[in-house]
Structures are given as structure tokens and as C-alpha cells.
Image (cartoon, coloured by chain):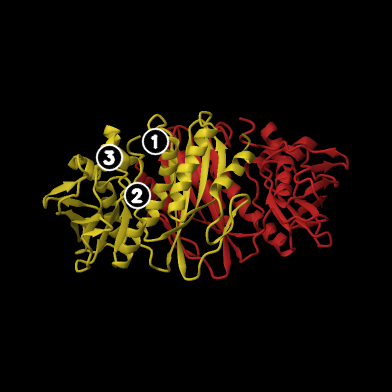
Chain colours: A red, B yellow
Amino acid sequence: MTERKLLEKITAWTGAPGEGIVRGIGDDCAVFRPRAGEDLVFTTDFLIEDVHFRRETHKAADVGYKALVRGLSDIAAMGAEPRFCLLSLALPEWADNRWTEGFYKGLLGLAAAHGTTLAGGDLARAEKLVCDIVVCGSVVRNKALRRDGAKPGDALFVSGLLGGSALGLSTGKGKAWKKHLHPEPRLALGRAVRDWGATACMDLSDGLSLDLHRLCVASNVSASLDGELPLFPGATPEQGIHGGEDYELLFTVRDEAKVPEDFDALPLTRIGTILEGNAGRIRIGGEFELLPMGYDHFSRS
Amino acid sequence: MTERKLLEKITAWTGAPGEGIVRGIGDDCAVFRPRAGEDLVFTTDFLIEDVHFRRETHKAADVGYKALVRGLSDIAAMGAEPRFCLLSLALPEWADNRWTEGFYKGLLGLAAAHGTTLAGGDLARAEKLVCDIVVCGSVVRNKALRRDGAKPGDALFVSGLLGGSALGLSTGKGKAWKKHLHPEPRLALGRAVRDWGATACMDLSDGLSLDLHRLCVASNVSASLDGELPLFPGATPEQGIHGGEDYELLFTVRDEAKVPEDFDALPLTRIGTILEGNAGRIRIGGEFELLPMGYDHFSRS
């Protein structure tokens, strides 16, 4: 299949462009018209064969889903609404037409469910499969949720149950494996968290211990984990604290803010409190220090 | 070096955020505030080791320059002004701290020369170096130059001299090699072409024969190459017609439009005319048909 034929197929699978897309796939650039009074948020996320997935365990549609859900989760963490995405895809020899179609079906199904048009990208050949997804979201001006606004005394919350993805990765079966393969981007929750006046928010991609450490460093505060962690059934406390790819939201609100116990049947749990000083340090159970042991591509290599 | 240390270094090399960047490197997303009355244009471009460059022949700064210039050239082809970029970078073991710094210096030097802030991206490890650059540009609403507007009777122009990059790639020396390593993005020319009322425009990345074919297919027209091609000194006609990576602009204007002979000492040459029907077909010298033989990642694999 030539690049032109593949582009024609991708254009057909993609369907009609969404709101704001003046020019989609097929030109030097995609053209997008922003709405008045909004800021735009942008995230890029790699998905690389044998780094982020293995083709022995992930079907084509699972890889396409995972490529996009990582970006959508970042959009959720900003309290924004996804608008469009761009996909750079380098295909190896083993990815035949059927695999490629399955990949796009997985990606475009998730995109359609969240009103996110595929507006462009790049294609290349490589020895291992590489995708890089860009997602653009929009949010009312000055209302994007950042990770640097947590203040001493703020309450620390997490959505959902932790450790499911790590458990699924270790067992390769059951509901935990499904959670690993098909996490839900918490888009509606992100916008609700923004409306509750959250002071900081981020998504849990590399594990609570590392991601909370990052939030605290950005906000120049420390934290105490003094609540019970909401664990995924069967997950160990270690999987809940250090396991990556849960794609739940971690957020802080003023102590007096009213956060419901759940959001659309998703539990919201107060797990700790933001403290002054010692930027990035995390206490657990009142006395022990929690070391950030989540996933770091570079320190593990 | 941990991911966090590398991020701190990148943030320091990047410097102050440019106009419109509300939040740069360091959050789940970059936050950008569009100006009123403008459309935004987006391009993504891979640069992959042993596909788009070889580390034996390209220094770190050359790779960084090339990663960005491909995107800036797409922005030029739309008649837009670059605003910010996002970089996804997967580093192999061989890329040590010194190489990585050189890469960012090459990329950020070019970015600074064209007012393009690095606003975010992603980092990962991989066996071979992969970068994917996203460039966002802005342009007055409805004024972006597309490739689908060429009309029968339009004059076809090209900027600069063709075949230099292909010649440089084959000899590895002299001015042609410099043209291959450090092409200039034709940003000011792109905006001028827009002001001259161009009907279509694109950049020459995969060779005149293939790129003109693409412009003609998009515009549903054919073309006749009846002017003399402006060849780079020493380049063969084949290198001028089929050679890739010249990053010059190919554009069409109404026959009566006034296009100067040069733009800031860069020659502008009328090389042909747009004709009716036979979408994508290109005649050369009045009778022979030119086959699109430029670079296609997929048909060559």
C-alpha cells in the first residue's frame, strides 16, 4: 500500500471533521478555528513498541485505544474538553493492512466517543512501531487546572481505585487486565473538579508516589497521606502506591470545599492533606517518608 | 540523568515563554491563548534515526535543526507565522548528555530565530532515536494557503534552486551538503505569497514531481512544466525534478498576478501552467508525461 492509498483510507475512516476544523487531513497543515474566550491546552504522548506495549499481548485496537487515551487523560487533568488530535505513526513491516485498520478503529472509536476529530499527522516507516499523539483541548480562559496551585491545608483527593493497572499487567487477566487495556479518560470528572474550585490537578500515569511528588514539587509543598488508599480489588498496597497507568485524577481543594463521595458512581476518596515546606516530600501514616518509586523512563534505563 | 533532571535542563535551555504561552513545560498540558481573529495551523513531522538521518553523518545540532525545520517549512507553506512547538523525543542509549544538549541547542537556536517557543512535549527511551515535532502557527482567519485551490490557467512558480539537497546527500560536501543539512524555512516568502493572492501553495519536501502531483490531485487539475527548472549548481535535472528535501515553496497564482523575479535575493521562477482535467497528470516539454517519482515512505519499503 502506498502512502497515498493509506492516507485515503485513514481519511475515509475518520469521517466528517468536527467543529472548528477548517481543514483536516490532506494539506501541509491542519487548520483549526478557536472559539472566542477560550484557552487551548496541548499534550503529546508517545506509544512505542516494547516500551509502552507488546504486540504479543496487545491487539491492534488496544494499541490504538491506548495511544489516544493517554492524551485524553491529560486533557481531563486540565479540566478541558478535547477538540482534535494529530497522529504521527511509524509502521514496521509486521503491521499489515489488517493490523493498521484495527489500530485506527481502536483509536477513532475512542476519539468519536469524546468528540475528538483526527485532523492530521505524519506517516513513516520504522523498525518498531512508534506513535505520537497530540491532543488539543479547550477550556474557558484562565480556568485550566494546573499542578502548581496546591496550598498548605488543602485536602488531597483521588478518583477511582488504585493499582488495577499494575495488577492487570502482572496477571494478564480479569477486570484488572481490562483496566490496564482500556482505562476511561476522566473527562467529565475533570470539568467537575474545575467547577469545585480545585487548586491543583493531574492524572496518575506514573504511579501515585511519583506523580504526587511531582505535584508537590510544582506547588512547592509537601503532603501527608493520612487516609486509607482506595485499592482495586486484589491489588497490593505497593501496586496502589507505586503502580502506573491508572489514569485516575489526583486533585487538591480548599479544606472547606464540598467534594461528593462519588461522581457518576466513581468513588472520590480523600487520601491526604497538603503541608507546608519540604517541597516534594511525602509522609505516610504520619511518620514514614514515602519515596517516589513510580515509573521514570530515564532512571530505569 | 533522571527524566526530572533532563526536564529541568530543557526548561532552562528553552528560556522565557513566548507571547500566548500561558503555561509552558512542566504540566500535564501546555496552555496557549490564541489571538482574536486568527486561525491556527498545525503540522507534525517525524525525524527517525536511519530513516530521516544517520548519526554518522549528522551532528547532534544538525539533527535538532532538521527536526524543527521540516515543521517550520509546513508553516511557511500555509502563509502562517510560527507560534510554538512541542517536541516528543525518544532517546537511545548512545545519546549521552553532550549529544542531547547539542540536539536541543540546534533545535532551540532555529526556534529562537523564528519566534517559536518550545512549550512542551514528551520524553521516552527507545532503541533508535525518534523525534516528532509539532509546530503551531497562526494566520488571519480564512487566509491560510491550501494546496487545493489551483485553477486552470494559473501560473506555477517555485522559489530558490532545486536539487541541492539531493546533490548534497550524494556528495556529502560543499554548498549542496550545507543546503541538505540546513535548509532555510521560507516563512517570510510564504506570507508574501499569501499577500500576492496565491491560489495554492505547498512546500517541496518529497521532490517536485511527487509534490506537484499531490497539489494537482488536491486541486483536481493537471499541469504543464514548460519553463526552465532553476537547478542548484551541479545538480542534475533528475535531482531537480525528483530530489527531496529542498524545502522550497511551490505555488500557483492567477496568470495576471504580479510576482517579482526574486524575494530578498531568492529567485522566483515560473516553471509551468495549471491545466484542466486529468487530475494529477503532469506534462513536461509539451508532450512527455512526468511520473511522480519523489519520496514515498511506503512504496519504497
Residue A52, picture quadrant:
top right
- In the displayed structure image, the side of residue B286 where residue A30 appears, left or right: right
Give the label on residue B184, or none.
2
Instruction: Check residue B53 in the rendering and tell me which mark sits there, or answer none.
Output: 1
From the image, which quarter does the N terminus of chain A lie in?
top left
Real-space Cα distance between discs 1 and 3? Answer: 16 Å
> How dense is the environment of label 2, judged by Cα within 10 Å: few (below 14), some, or many (20 and up)?
some
Amino acid type of the residue that numbered disc 2 sits on in the rendered structure: Glu
Q: For mark 3, name the chain.
A: B
**Label 3 sits on residue:** B176
Q: Residues within 10 Å of mark 1 (few under 14, many from 20)?
A: some
Mark 3 crowdedness (10 Å alpha carbons): few <14, some 14-19, many ≥20: many
Residue B267, image x, y percentages: 23, 55
Q: Residue furthest right?
A: A286
Asked if the residue at tag 1 contacts the one at tag 2, i.e. Cβ–Cβ closer than 8 Å, the answer is no
- Judge whether residue A88 can be spotted in this image: no
- Asked if labels 1 and 3 share a chain, the reply is yes
